[in-house]
Image (tube, rainbow, N blue to C red):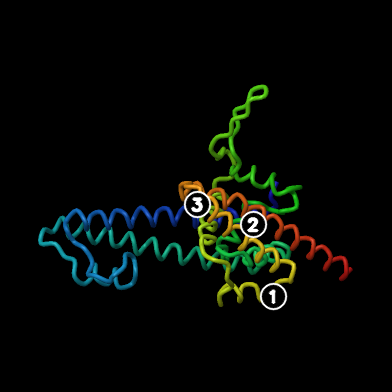
Amino acid sequence: MPDAEHEALRDLVRAREAAKKDQLRARHRLSKFLLRHGRRPPVGVALWTVKYLEWVKRDVHFAVKAQEATLLDYLHEVEHMAARIVRLDSAIEEAVKVAPAKMRAVIEGLQALRGIAKISAVTIVAELGEVTRFSKARELMGYAGIVASENSSGERQRRGSITKTGNAHLRRVVVEAAWAYRHRPAIGFTLRKRQGNLSEEVKEIAWKAQHRLHARYGKLLAKGKNKGVVVTAVGRELLGFIWAIGVQVEAEQKESLRQAA
């Protein structure tokens, strides 16, 4: 069972996840309303950028009051959702600052992995609790529901799609992170900064993950697999590296406490 700190943090990151879903719905309502009335942004203005919202506020108007009221309501909802996410991000930052040292250490350690920044790392830790409660990576994959379903009888074995019977919040974050491994292995400025205070062992695991998962992505894609299937398979293997880093960091924390005692 999660302790009070893990449960509180889990509630907070799930609130943010709900806010992101609400933001997506609000954006869809506004964009579909504009398209339905033939209002398209100028060339070079990407959706949901600052320039896009400025264009909507400045240049999009309707002669009929009912339609203008609809536009303003949809626009207000989009801005409200954006402010809500900023507020929750700030709350997550503050919650991490007062979290137990072991939890903070694992959050920092997971950010050594490509595709896993602070919010993703916090979500993973909040959903998992202590990583060492899983004796092996395969157990963690099963917990996330990213293992193949099986329908076997006697000597016949038949495997199907992933079970999706595990933790959906964890599965979503991991699959989203897996998209980063379609790119060649590299350590950019942001990733190097995240890895700055981490042990060499953790950084070595993260670097190994880049090479293995990028190769896995390319190999499955070359076989003609659907990109969604490929990314899910990469996400399953990414969980193995998440487990390895979690176990390593928790062991380092345990050793630090032993030496300090």
Q: Which image quarter is the C terminus in?
A: bottom right
User: Could you tell me residue 96's position as x and y percent?
Assistant: 62, 66
Nearest the camera: 161 or 97?
Answer: 161
- 2 or 1: tag closer to the N-terminus: 2
Residue at the image point whose x is 29% and y is 69% from the top: 52
Residue at the far top in the pictured view = 154
Give me the C-alpha separation between circle 2 and circle 1: 19 Å
Residue at the image point whose x is 51% and y is 48% from the top: 223
Tell me the residue that label 1 is attached to.
Answer: 197
User: Can you tell which mark lies on residue 222?
Assistant: 3
Q: Secondary structure at mark 1?
A: loop
The amino acid at mark 2 is Val
User: Could you tell me residue 139's position as x and y percent?
Assistant: 69, 44
Residue 205 placement, left or right of 73: right
The amino acid at mark 3 is Ala
- 3 or 2: tag closer to the N-terminus: 2
User: Are the residues at dot 3 and dot 1 in contact (C-beta closer than 8 Å)?
Assistant: no
Tell me the residue that label 2 is attached to.
Answer: 125
- 3 or 1: tag closer to the N-terminus: 1
Residue at the image point whose x is 63% and y is 29% from the top: 157
- Crowd band around label 1 with a 10 angstrom C-alpha radius: few (<14), some (14–19), many (20+): few
Q: Quadrant of residue 42?
A: bottom left
Of marks 3 and 2, the one in the foreground: 3
Of marks 2 and 1, the one in the foreground: 1
Q: Secondary structure at mark 3?
A: helix
- Crowd band around label 2 with a 10 angstrom C-alpha radius: few (<14), some (14–19), many (20+): many
Residue 259 placement, left or right of 171: right
